[in-house]
Amino acid sequence: MGRTAPTYRQALEERLKRWDAFAHLLTTPEDRAAFELVRTGARRYAAQATYVGSPDLLEAILLSVLTDLAGRLRAAEPERPPRR
Amino acid sequence: MADGAPLPHGWLLDITESPDGRSVVLWVKDRTDGRVRRAAVDFRPPFLVAGPGDELRALLRRLRDVPAVASAELGVGRPSLFDRRPRPVVRVVPRLNPGRRALAREIDASGGYATFTLYDVDLGPPQLYHLARGLYPFAPVAGSGPAWVATEPAETIVYRTPPLRVAPLELRLEGARRGRLPPPEGRIAAVRLGDVTLDGPEEALLRALVDELARTDPDVLLTEGGDAFDLPWLYRRAGACGLSPGAFALGRVPTAFSPTRPARSFTSYGRVLHRDATYPVPGRFHIDRSNSFLYEDTELAGLIDAARLSRLSLQTVARQSPGTCFTAMEMAQALAEGAHVPWKKNRPEGFRTGASLVASDRGGAILLPPVGVHDHVEEFDFASLYPHIMVRQNLSTETLDCPCCPRSPYRAPGLGYRSCTRRVGLLPRTLEPLLARRLAYKEALRVPGLAPEEARRLRQRVKMLKWILVTAFGYQGYRNARFGRIECHEAINAYARELLASLVAEAERAGYRTVHGIVDSLWLRPADPGDPPDPERFARRASARLRLPLGYEGRYRWIVFLPAVTHGLGVPNRYYGLYAHGEFKLRGIGGRRHDTPTLLRRFELEVLELLRGARDADGVRALLPRALARADRFAGRLADGAWPVDELLIAHRIGQAPETFVTFTDSVAAIRQLSAAGAPRGAGEMVRFVVLDRASRSWRERVRAAELLEGDERYDVDAYLELLAREAELLLAPLGVRREELLRRWHVAVAPERGRYRSAEVADQTALPRAAPGAVT
């Protein structure tokens, strides 16, 4: 299409592909599963990251992953049931 | 029509260019006897040249001796939308209308492509005649030819159209089935025109066709593939029989046996597409359903509405994209207001930083849907969101960041682009009547006791306007759009993102939770399904608050959001659901895609019909075993080898010039077969084929192209079981259906999954032998 800049979703996939190398040398299934969580977290908030429109790709990815992890943490806390 | 207006003599159907190059022909259908009469009128419209005064005077002196110029005179005008004060312009009348562009190019070149700006060069004389005389296609006209006067304006909402005689036209060749490859010298065995089928020896048959055309005198020749096949074939055979264009005319006057526009390949939205040659027939309308995007959806009533508003001939409108129609409407608006149409858009995008590009080059907001089956979901859509934003925020090429309003309160969120507060831009001026028109048609549709024919016409017009309004936004970002400007495109998106975000907040306050959202649509679920908010009331309140019409589309009994094959998270535009009123909404699944074989459509249809019985999400889940049983039944019949091959055709659009393919694929095999059979295909065309042996390296054995099918081919059972499994997974993945499991169940060897990651080292090693020249392989 007539776009000049790649979309956030495209840039994210490009970066995740680079991270494949990181996963390649993870040696336990637990580590690999944990890394999958990071990847999923990064993708889960693509809409919100796009909305920010920051030129800093890593900032957007980190925000997504952290939000995802914080959500999982809240859900795991026994005394405070999750809102969603 | 207002009372007291003169009764129209008839309707202006079309204006065409005369072969003499100095006049146009008006075709008027008489109201009383229904006959179409022509009247030629001298018309050589000028084009405009603007530039510095002394350069224009020098140009005037030079043009005096140019034979291609009939006249050239210096005057003043405000040709550009940006002009606030009159400036000198030269009006050039070419000696012959077809010489317009060549002359304009010469003038442009003489100014080094920089000194002069040219206007109105590539508008057709018929289009300009309409605008100069206040006429339009299908105008009711009074008076006498050629000085016809329209009795009502083009924008009239309730109007009568002339009764048109529509005749389907179709050829049959000797010894050939339609859809199969015609023999190169195939004689015409029969022609169907309307209700009559003509046959007999070829030359007599062609002459009989001309007689039949004269006898029934149809206004519209409706074909299915006429631009690609029927008309060129008729002309070719007429030539072979020794008939001249004068003796074999399909229009109301003779025309050359050649297309007015050759076939071509082009790129749109990243896809290579193909457009057939164009064969209009003067005095009548040739509409090729398969070469008309708009006809499919809007039919004659929609096309006529578009022709009226754009001042383009019905034959042109039928073959154009909605975007081109909208541009023509903008041109008409501009010319009616005294501005002119720049030939070349001299408005390159300004320089900017990478950060501002990242911030501005974004689309609407698209959320990630939760994969799975859901119920209690309600859908809300903004009606014509983007056009409304353009009108409300006064977004137009000449109103954005204008010098007169540095303190404008209209600012694109996050981008800061201002719009003018003093003058309404061309884009809003063009759009506002279209929005009002669409609303008027929709309201007319609600009137009780409407005749079914009238309702149909109104619905077709509504659809046409919808397409036009949708493309109006996209064309802002198109580099060749005459009045487009990329910053408008960006500003519209910025406003739209902001609106969707506000709507999410609004919905939460009203007691909803957001399930999914795409640009102008929102799917919501009550926070407490036992006590849901009133959706109509929410839509009304949100409309009032955001000052935009938010419509309530309906409640779903259930809706399934589908995952991506690659990562398992939701895909924004892939879902299917059943509204409470019993209609399905399908997006991104087989039936909506053009390349899906009938086999898979059938399967999808059966599954959907089965799921129609589910009242909620649990109901859908409960039906899974029965859906799987359907899949097994399809697989069993496929494995018997008895499925009709016509239903196994896979369609592929050729994405590049066929000789540039380096990998051997099914499509490549089909292309080579067709080319060996004397029917080469170009980039952007479709090939359709049945897979016979997907492992074969031979282009003869791997597939069979649709045009070469005999009907008794043995298809590759595993290849189609694989496709079926993929389709079943696509539809039912949220219920736990996996492709591999189905294939194991059907005893098909599952292809091992390829490794996701290849390290730099591995990639280098496999690349080595190929990189070394002369390496032995």
Image (cartoon, rainbow, N blue to C red):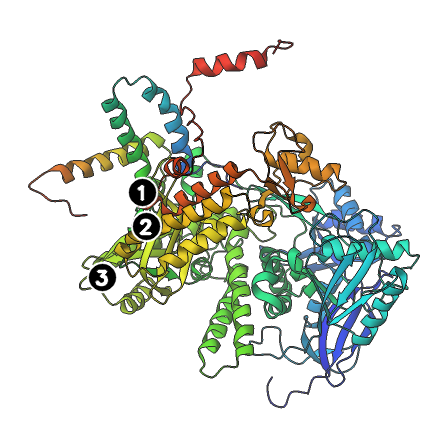
Looking at the image, is B396 positioned above or below residue B430? above
Please state the chain letter of the residue tagged with numbered disc 1 in the rendered image.
B
Q: Amino acid at mark 2?
A: Leu
The mark nearer the N terminus, 3 or 2, is: 3
Badge 2 crowding class, 10 Å Cα cut-off, few under 14, some 14 to 19, many 20 or more, is some
The residue that mark 1 highlights is B736
Q: Quadrant of the N terminus of chain B?
A: bottom right
Please state the chain letter of the residue tagged with numbered disc 2 in the rendered image.
B
Q: Are marks 3 and 1 on the same chain?
A: yes
The mark nearer the N terminus, 3 or 1, is: 3
- Indicate which disc residue B624 carries: 2
Q: What is the x, y in percent for residue B398?
A: 53, 54
Q: CA distance from mark 2 to mark 1?
A: 9 Å
The residue that mark 3 highlights is B510
Secondary structure at numbered mark 1 = loop
The mark nearer the N terminus, 2 or 1, is: 2
Badge 1 crowding class, 10 Å Cα cut-off, few under 14, some 14 to 19, many 20 or more, is few
Residue at 41% across, 23% down: B755
Looking at the image, is B209 positioned above or below residue B727? below
Q: Quadrant of residue B97?
A: bottom right
Front in this rendered view, residue B570 or B615: B615
Q: Amino acid at mark 3?
A: Ala
Secondary structure at numbered mark 3 = loop
> Is the Cβ of the residue at disc 2 closer than 8 Å to that at disc 1?
yes
Q: Quadrant of residue A48?
A: top left
Badge 3 crowding class, 10 Å Cα cut-off, few under 14, some 14 to 19, many 20 or more, is some
Please state the chain letter of the residue tagged with numbered disc 3 in the rendered image.
B
Q: What is the x, y in percent for residue B352?
A: 47, 37
Q: Quadrant of the C terminus of chain B?
A: top right
